Structure formats: structure tokens, C-alpha cells
Amino acid sequence: MAPEEVMNLAYQGMRIAVFLAGPILLSALTTGLLISLFQAATQINEMTLTFIPKVLAIFAVLVLAGPWMLQVITSFTTRLFTEIPLMVS
């Protein structure tokens, strides 16, 4: 297996990881930012106030984007397993 193939495989793996983690992290970031703005405007300094909306936002993203995420990781894994014989030789 050539170093270029290893680097290409690592690049594809990192790209898939970013695609899968991106929507979840962006929803948590956006929800946290909105709650922080609300807390700053109302001067409510409750640390637990951000927890429930973030969990609900992440759950909503997983429900909406879950099938797409599952399809992406399944196709990547299937492609990886089918190319293993080609990588060995």
C-alpha cells in the first residue's frame, strides 16, 4: 500500500467525520449562542438553562439528519470493505 493511498484514505475518513459531526456541532453552537444572548439580555445567570435546549436541538438534528448520516457512513464503510482486497495487493 503506497503512502499516497494511506493519505487519501485518511483524508476521506476525516472528511466523513467532519460531515457527520458538523450538523450536530453547528446546532449545539447556534443554540448555545442564542441562549447566551438571551441570558446576557435578561441578566439570568443560570448555567443549567443552556443544557436542555442544546439537548433538544441535537436530538432534532439527529432525527432530521440521522438517515443521511447513516447512509454516508454506511456507504463509506461498504466502499472501504470492498476495496480492502485491492489495497493488500
Image: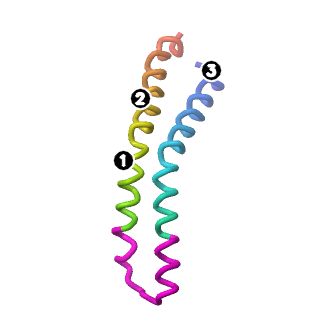
- Distance from the alpha carbon under mark 3 to that under mark 1: 40 Å
Q: Find the magenta span and give its range.
A: 33-52
Task: Assess disc 3: are there few (<14), some (14-19) or many (≥20) residues with their C-alpha within 10 Å of its C-alpha.
Answer: few
Q: Earlier in the sequence, mark 3 or mark 1?
A: 3
Q: Is residue 40 above or below residue 16?
A: below
The residue lying furthest to the right in this view is 4
The residue that disc 1 covers is 63
Is 87 situated left or right of 55 in this image? right
Q: Nearer the viewer, mark 3 or mark 1?
A: 1
Q: Earlier in the sequence, mark 2 or mark 3?
A: 3
Residue type, label 3: Ala
Which residue occupies 40% across, 59% down?
57
Task: Assess disc 2: are there few (<14), some (14-19) or many (≥20) residues with their C-alpha within 10 Å of its C-alpha.
Answer: few
Q: Is residue 48 magenta?
A: yes
- Distance from the alpha carbon under mark 2 to that under mark 3: 25 Å
Quadrant housing the N terminus: top right
Q: Position of residue 29 (x, y in %)?
A: 51, 63
Which residue occupies 53% across, 42% down?
19
Q: Is residue 11 magenta?
A: no
Q: Secondary structure at mark 3?
A: loop
Residue type, label 2: Thr
Label disc, if present, on residue 74 of the rendered structure: 2
- State the image quarter where residue 11 is shown: top right
The residue that disc 3 covers is 2
Residue type, label 1: Val
Which residue occupies 52% across, 49% down?
22
